């Protein structure tokens, strides 16, 4: 289940984008693209399982403004994954 390094870089870039999304810097359409990548990428499927709350946040953010503490938790989780 190993991935080529460039794919790993892509996935990390995606995580960074997700973090930016939580800051309101990405469009919901871009968030949808991210979710689609996660659906087709083994590494990101595993990651998404650990980021379940964050992905729910991503989804919810399209509907409504998120409480700051929810955004903060999601961002902290993404940061932890990026630093692994
Ligand atoms: Zn991926």
Image (tube, helix red, strand yellow):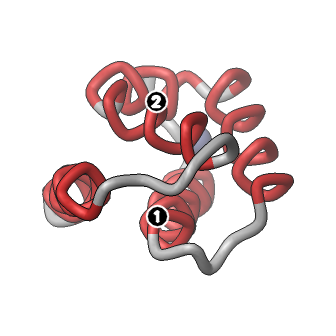
Considering every residue shown, the one lying at the far right of the view is 29
Residue 63, compared with residue 23, is above or below; it is: above
Residue 39 position, x and y percent, is 68, 22
Residue 40, compared with residue 66, is above or below; it is: above
Q: Which one is in front, 37 or 8? A: 37
40 relative to 81 in the view: left or right: right
**Ligand 1 position by quadrant:** top right
Q: Which mark is residue 60?
A: none
Q: Which one is in front, 37 or 1? A: 37
Please indicate, yes or no, whether residue 80 appears anywhere in the rendered image.
yes
Residue 24, compared with residue 12, is above or below; it is: below
Label 1 CB sits under 8 Å from any ligand 1 atom? no
The residue identified by callout 2 is 56
Q: What secondary structure is marked by label 2?
A: helix
Q: Quadrant of residue 84?
A: bottom left
Residue 74 position, x and y percent, is 27, 50
Q: Which mark is residue 22?
A: 1
Please state the total of marks drawn on the protein image.
2
**Residue at x 56%, y 66% (from the top left corner):** 21
Q: Which one is in front, 15 or 27? A: 27
What's the CA distance linking mark 2 and mark 1? 11 Å
């Amino acid at each position: 289940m190993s991935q080529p390094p460039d794919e790993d870089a892509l996935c990390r870039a995606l995580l960074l984008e997700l973090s930016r999304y939580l800051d309101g810097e990405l469009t919901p359409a871009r968030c949808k693209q991210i979710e689609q990548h996660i659906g087709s990428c083994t590494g990101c499927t595993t990651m998404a399982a650990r980021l379940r709350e964050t992905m729910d946040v991503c989804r919810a953010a399209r509907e409504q403004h998120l409480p700051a503490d929810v955004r903060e938790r999601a961002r902290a989780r993404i940061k932890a994954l990026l630093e692994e």
